Amino acid sequence: MTVMILALQVVLPLGLIAWLAFLPAGDLAGFALQAAGIGAFTFALARVAQWAVKLLRGPEVRR
């Protein structure tokens, strides 16, 4: 499960960047919105990524 989450955290942003590169919006405003959306998603994923992996591993044992 952890490997799947980590793979998704790599593949999804790369797929979004490829979408922006190969299928850009038709006008400048659409391109700006597309780029802003991808940037916001990537930023949010970077903030949550470590938390998600720690959550899947379970509680840490403290001695």
Image (cartoon, rainbow, N blue to C red):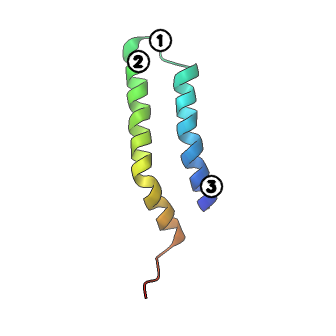
Q: Amino acid at mark 1?
A: Gly
Q: Name the residue beneath numbered marker 1.
A: 26
Please rate how many residues cluster around mark 1, counting C-alpha atoms within 10 Å: few if below 14, some from 14 to 19, many from 20: few
Q: Are marks 3 and 1 in contact (CB under 8 Å)?
A: no
Residue furthest to the bottom in view is 63
User: Image height check: is 24 above or below 14?
Assistant: above
Residue plotted at (39% across, 13% down): 28
Query: Residue 40: x and y, percent?
Result: 38, 37
Please rate how many residues cluster around mark 3, counting C-alpha atoms within 10 Å: few if below 14, some from 14 to 19, many from 20: few
Left or right of 16? Residue 28 is left
Q: Name the residue beneath numbered marker 2.
A: 30
Whichever of callouts 3 and 1 sits on the residue coming sooner in the sequence is 3
Q: Which quadrant would residue 62 be assigned to in this image?
A: bottom left
Query: Residue 3: x and y, percent?
Result: 63, 58
**Measured Cα–Cα span from mark 2 to mark 1:** 7 Å
Whichever of callouts 3 and 2 sits on the residue coming sooner in the sequence is 3
Query: Residue 18: x and y, percent?
Result: 57, 28
Disc 3 element: helix
Q: Name the residue beneath numbered marker 3.
A: 4
Quarter of the figure with the C terminus: bottom left
Residue plotted at (47% across, 66% down): 55
Disc 2 element: helix
Quarter of the figure with the N terminus: bottom right
Residue furthest to the top in view is 27
Residue plotted at (41% across, 34% down): 39
Q: Are marks 2 and 1 in contact (CB under 8 Å)?
A: yes
Disc 1 element: loop
Q: Are marks 3 and 2 in contact (CB under 8 Å)?
A: no
Q: Amino acid at mark 2?
A: Gly
Query: Residue 43: x and y, percent?
Result: 40, 42
**Measured Cα–Cα span from mark 3 to mark 2:** 32 Å
**Measured Cα–Cα span from mark 3 to mark 1:** 34 Å
